[in-house]
Amino acid sequence: MLNKKSLMISTMLMPTVGVFGFAGSAWAQCAITDCAALGYTEAYNSSGNCLKCPFGEAYSCEKGYICPEGYDYTCSGIGYAGGVGEACNGKYAECTCSEG
């Protein structure tokens, strides 16, 4: 038999459990699966010391690893609009020029 005190306690706890249950499920739905946003910005694993992104074909490598041949340009400064394609250790194979 349920007494009055037990009924009152369970009635008070029900909304609290519901709020925490919703907050937990809302948090789980906001997980980031974008490799670039998680820091996996390299396209190659040439050194063998890179971590592969679990959501795609991107890598996170230690600074100073050897890039494939042709990644020679930083594409920054006056006259540059940015790099073309994926960066390797902060350098690109091609750059785009700014207008003017």
Image (cartoon, rainbow, N blue to C red):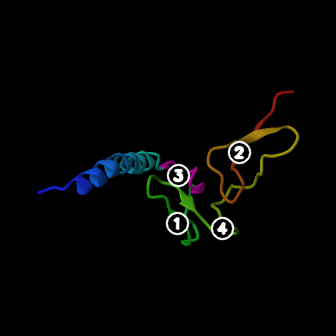
In the image, what residue type sits under mark 1? Leu
Is 10 in the magenta?
no
Residue 51 is labelled as: 1
Residue extent of the magenta highlight: 32-42
Q: Position of residue 85 (x, y in %)?
A: 62, 44
Residue that numbered label 3 is attached to: 35
Cα separation between marks 3 and 1: 11 Å
Q: Residue at the location (69% across, 67% down)? A: 63
SS for dot 2: strand
- The N terminus appears in which quarter of the rendering? bottom left
Residue that numbered label 4 is attached to: 66
Q: Main secondary structure of the magenta part?
A: loop
Q: Residue at the location (30% across, 54% down)? A: 9
Q: Is residue 61 left or right of residue 28?
A: right
- The C terminus appears in which quarter of the rendering? top right
> What is the crowding at mark 2: few (fewer than 14 residues within 10 Å), some, or many (at least 20)?
some
Residue that numbered label 2 is attached to: 94
SS for dot 3: loop
> What is the crowding at mark 3: few (fewer than 14 residues within 10 Å), some, or many (at least 20)?
some
Q: Position of residue 94 (x, y in %)?
A: 71, 45
Residue 45 against residue 11 in the figure, above or below: below
Given residues 74 and 28, the one toward you in this image is 28
Q: Position of residue 68 (x, y in %)?
A: 63, 61
Cα separation between marks 3 and 2: 22 Å
Which numbered disc, 3 or 2, marks the residue closer to the eye?
A: 3
Disc on the earlier residue, 1 or 2:
1
